[in-house]
Amino acid sequence: MIEQREGAYQQFLFYLKQATAQIPSQYMLFPVAGEPNPIYRERVYYYELYHQLRVTTGDDFGYSLGGEVDKSRHPILREFALDKTKPDLLVHRPGDMSGNLIVMEVKPVTARAEHIRKDLCNLTSFVLRGQYYRAIYLIYSGSDAEFASFQKRALRQVQKVPRGQIDLRIIDLFWHRSPDLLAIQMKWDAG
């Protein structure tokens, strides 16, 4: 069973990398009339990512992609206070907890510390309690310096919560630096 899930996870990582390379620039930094510079709009990026993932995975992947699935009143997740969450993406088999493969959150490189902390706590809890195989935190856009700053903000959040609420060992960090590039897996430690 673990080998099957690991194989499906690796296959999804291939799809994720291919999908990110197809996201045009206007979805990473959104142009706004009257504004001289484009701005980050997480949902604009995320919806295009979802679209590209659907195209890339096709219908034979064996798992469903669920965008912002509302977990309200979920009878199992309610026990772990996850029933009030809406992860950006679930890769799963709806109605079958053993089919929970990936839970993913997406943020721009400029994400605020409190949002990072909330995402990391939720991702950890979905893996440890919600029976997901792995979690992915996908960060998009930014320079090397901006990404290093994100890493520092994230690592500081681990120190601000009780031990065990965030486990970076079960959350894979990916960075989609710019359009036309594949997202790459990164280390949590900037060093």
Image (cartoon, rainbow, N blue to C red):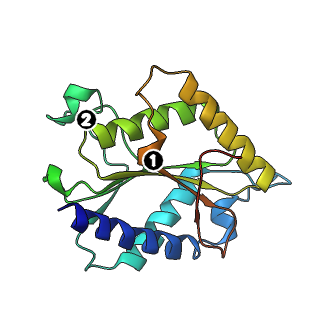
Mark linked to residue 171: 1
Left or right placement of residue 34 versus residue 8 in this view = right
Seen in the picture, residue 183 relative to 57 is either above or below; the reply is above
Looking at the rendered image, the disc whose residue lies closer to the viewer, 2 or 1, is 1
Q: Residue 54: which quarter of the image?
A: bottom left
Tell me where residue 73 appears, x and y as whole percent.
19, 33
Q: Residues within 10 Å of mark 2 (few under 14, many from 20)?
A: some
Left or right placement of residue 74 versus residue 155 in this view = left
Numbered label tally? 2
Tell me where residue 52 appears, x and y as whole percent.
47, 73
Q: Amino acid at mark 1?
A: Ile
Tell me where residue 153 appears, x and y as whole percent.
66, 34
Mark linked to residue 75: none
Is label 2 in contact with label 1 (beta carbons under 8 Å)? no
Seen in the picture, residue 33 relative to 151 is either above or below; the reply is below
Tell me where residue 151 appears, x and y as whole percent.
66, 43
Task: Give the residue drawn at x 30%, y 64%.
Answer: 6
Q: Amino acid at mark 2?
A: Ser
Q: Residue furthest right?
A: 36
Q: Which residue is mark 2?
A: 72
Seen in the picture, residue 46 relative to 75 is either above or below; the reply is below
The numbered mark, 2 or 1, whose residue comes first in the sequence reads 2
Left or right placement of residue 173 versus residue 2 in this view = right
The residues bearing labels 2 and 1 have C-alpha atoms spaced at a distance of 23 Å
Task: Give the residue drawn at x 36%, y 76%.
Answer: 57
Task: Give the residue drawn at x 25%, y 36%.
Answer: 129
Q: Nearer the viewer, residue 157 or 85?
A: 157
